[in-house]
């Protein structure tokens, strides 16, 4: 029932007009990278596939629709027996993606394609948003560990759980959210809240209880009363008086408030002078990629690890990932006729028809551009390949000494999955490998990143232009 | 399993130290109204109550925790039989609330209170965020209908479903999200996407099919090709050629792109001149309270109804509602000893102890202030009541001719609900009634709203100051 009601009103209309089994293709794409970044990370595919495989309407659902008094009994009976019968082509989960690319395509009977719209968009939009945000924060942390602490500020329970999954894909080392740890095997971590310290009243007593219970994993929260005058002195005593006699070391301290640059530097010095230079400093207080980057590069903060809450799990600086779902082609006899959505705004004109998406690599393995081709078009990489930059179509350009990789795979055929899906750790490594080896550093910077080229083969560009001209002529 | 792992590490520690059954009280409160508004709306209570009533750990959950190698077998056995045994006091759902007020209090055995933290916060934070945002957008719409169209941009499925519930509490008239319609009885609506028009290719043909299928509820999406030159002329033809011969009227048209002020004014004129002055204009395109307000008050747009998507369902301008969960008191023998969390920042010092929250009404029924009292403290409204404004404690002030309403109720006692919960429509009406009759207009404006007073009885203020002094003395 994760659908917009218009999907039902349209479906009932298509059913009535005997168009329900016409094959159509819908593309999912987005128009802008979040936070004015240079790319985004595709996430949520596994849940999309699970959704379409298991999608049914219960008797209660059908009865609910009957009560809306808009649908024919024949249509309601049809819903009762509905299973998704379409195909899904998509980028592998974790692929670095760019605006206006067909990241997922549904090829299905008309009603089937229409009914999965909202569920696909909600899943892809949410997880891609959080994976992309996590990647940015990890980038800012420059190799230091970043953990997801966001559940309590997530937009309800799914957002916490699937958000943690997406954050892990994007590079965090773990989460505090138990549901995500259990469902997806993400490493979980957690120590103490202020309430632990407040419950015992005496800070030293509270720390001692904790260290005795978890001597191998003692991370003490030092800001309940006063970091410098109480928290750190007590933590140092714990290290010397409780842990060292057991042959253990104090693993870390956590600061959750105050001026993190100032405090972390003072704390580092205090710990070092107490012989605790191996004790890690963990911080957590409304951080994001901008504050993390500023702390490390401009303020000289001494921080080993970050716990990131609300600004990761809600992607606070830009909490909307705007992927859309647009009709690209309609089956007519034995072929697909392309469809285009025009707009006053040139950027909003859709890319029509069935198509393939290639990534173009130079001799060093760097991704120099992406390329849209007509579906099934053969690309010959043994000689220069002409292409059109749709921003500057008058230029005559070619890829030379490049290789081409068809980025998308068929994951679902006639409603059943065709590919074994990768494990979450493999997806996470795939993200890292792309960013370490394939994607230009110039696209990864936060400020004014290089804009990745999305080019077209001459044949595809011609198809689009022809259709645009015809459509304009027909509708003024 | 909607919990942060530290709740488990602490619980295991409390269990080990035989503190698990000590009674404690935790308060939920928040520190700032979203969007610099004058108030927020409390939402999500029903789901909190359902959660604590049904909270258990499955064998798989317990096994998952065992594999973390941090917990004793005794503790794991304890979890297996865990049921929440505490009490919950809260504002009725839909109550207008203000920063630093105890909007919900858990009084429970220590472990019970700790384990429900994240689930309570995630639910209250999410639904209060969206209810408050919805209220702001409805306020800007000044009586025009506002509908939730946001599912596809929500942070996953729960966010769409519970977000629609919260938006309805906040004042929207309906949602497009079927799951929310079915689960909560919220009116649902939906007409057509651009894909409907693109599928048929010819716009007139597509409109005709729709009007013939839904002659009583024809709302046509007019911006697939060109609103002025194609969409509206075709919609007018449909009204005259298809609907009027059936004795029906064209209910509305929807514009989803372009300059809504300019288009809505031109469209209104075209419709009026065609004898369709009863045809409604619906708009939907990345709107929020600021754009809605500007369209209506500054740009003279002719709009009857708004469909609001991403900026409502993610509360885009401020997507974090920051309610926290802080220890307020610990049971000692036969009483509760208050606990306080100090901070360098005066605003972040918590309000300790068990307490009651009153709303103070003047003779006209306007809420002039809220008042924190010691739990069970008797307020005598037959004569002036002295109070302390904690921002200006040196002033000697009294409420005169005021009435006092204890805002909170006990909803759960020893893990079982004690109150029948109101229907969703009753919650929605309660919100409206408060805003129409009790809450000053000065608190409801967007720009620099009046800040509601949160005062204290002299006895409560003395308790807080005493504890603060003692705590400061003990921890430097």
Image: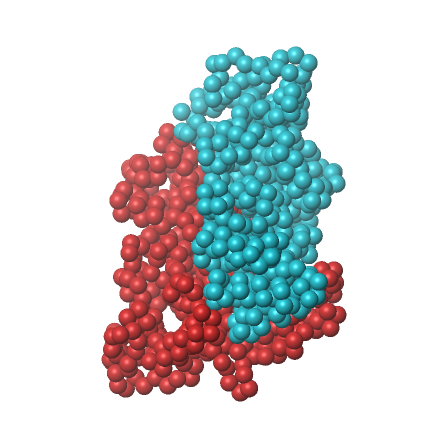
Chain colours: A red, B cyan
Give the residue displayed 59% in from the left and 77% down from the top: A109
Q: How far across and down, in percent of the image, does residue A250 sit?
A: 39, 43
Left or right? Give the position of B199 relative to B415. left
Q: How far across and down, in percent of the image, does residue B325 sit?
A: 54, 38
| A275 relative to A95, above or below | above
The image quadrant that residue A430 belongs to is bottom left
Left or right? Give the position of B196 relative to A429. right
| A105 relative to B233, above or below | below
Give the residue displayed 56% in from the left and 70% down from the top: B204
Tally of marks: 0
| B338 relative to A349, above or below | above
Give the residue displayed 65% in from the left and 42% down from the top: B428
Specify the quadrant that holds the C terminus of chain A.
Answer: bottom left
Left or right? Give the position of B139 relative to A321. right
Specify the quadrant that holds the N terminus of chain A.
Answer: bottom right
Q: Is residue B395 visible?
A: yes
Q: Is residue A5 visible?
A: no
Q: How far across and down, in percent of the image, does residue A191 sit?
A: 48, 45
Q: How far across and down, in percent of the image, does residue B214 sit?
A: 67, 65
């Amino acid at each position: 029932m994760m659908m917009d009601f218009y999907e039902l009103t349209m479906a009932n209309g298509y059913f009535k007009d005997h168009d329900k089994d016409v094959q159509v293709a819908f593309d999912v794409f987005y128009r802008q990278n979040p936070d004015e970044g240079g790319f985004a990370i595709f996430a949520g595919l596994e849940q999309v596939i699970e959704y379409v495989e298991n999608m049914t309407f219960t008797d209660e659902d059908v009865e609910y629709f009957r009560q809306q008094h808009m649908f024919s009994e024949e249509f309601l009976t049809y819903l009762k027996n509905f299973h998704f019968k379409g195909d899904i082509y998509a980028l592998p989960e974790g692929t670095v993606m760019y605006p206006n690319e067909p990241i997922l395509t549904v090829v299905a009977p008309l009603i089937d394609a229409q009914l999965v719209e909202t569920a696909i968009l909600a899943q892809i939009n949410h997880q891609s948003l959080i994976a992309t945000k996590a990647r940015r924060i990890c980038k800012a942390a420059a190799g230091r560990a970043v953990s997801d602490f966001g559940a309590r500020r997530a937009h309800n329970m799914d957002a916490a759980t699937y958000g943690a999954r997406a954050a892990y894909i994007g590079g965090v080392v773990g989460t505090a959210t138990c549901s995500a740890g259990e469902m997806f095997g993400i490493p979980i971590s957690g120590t103490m809240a202020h309430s632990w310290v407040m419950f015992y009243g005496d800070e030293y007593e509270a720390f001692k209880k904790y260290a005795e219970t978890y001597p191998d994993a003692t991370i003490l929260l030092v800001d309940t009363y006063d970091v410098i005058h109480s928290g750190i002195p007590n933590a140092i005593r714990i290290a010397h008086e409780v842990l060292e006699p057991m042959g253990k070391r104090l693993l870390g301290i956590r600061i959750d408030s105050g001026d993190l640059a100032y405090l972390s530097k003072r704390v580092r010095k205090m710990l070092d002078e107490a012989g605790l230079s191996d004790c890690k400093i963990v911080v957590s207080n409304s951080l994001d990629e901008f504050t993390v980057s500023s702390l490390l590069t401009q303020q000289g903060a001494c921080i080993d690890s970050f716990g990131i809450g609300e600004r990761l799990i809600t992607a606070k600086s830009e909490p909307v990932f705007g992927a859309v779902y647009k009709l690209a082609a309609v089956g007519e006899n034995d072929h697909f006729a392309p469809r285009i959505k025009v707009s006053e705004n040139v950027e909003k004109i859709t890319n029509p028809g069935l198509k393939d998406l290639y990534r173009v690599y130079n001799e060093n393995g760097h991704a120099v551009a992406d390329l849209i081709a007509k579906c099934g078009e053969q690309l010959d990489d043994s000689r220069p390949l002409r292409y059109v930059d749709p921003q500057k179509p008058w230029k005559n350009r070619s890829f030379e000494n490049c290789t081409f990789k068809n980025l998308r795979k068929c994951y679902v055929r006639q409603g059943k999955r065709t590919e074994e899906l990768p494990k979450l750790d493999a997806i996470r490594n795939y993200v890292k490998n792309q960013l370490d080896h394939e994607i230009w550093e110039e696209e990864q910077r936060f400020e004014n990143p290089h804009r990745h080229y999305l080019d077209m083969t001459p044949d595809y560009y011609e198809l689009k232009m022809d259709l645009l001209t015809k459509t304009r002529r027909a509708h003024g």
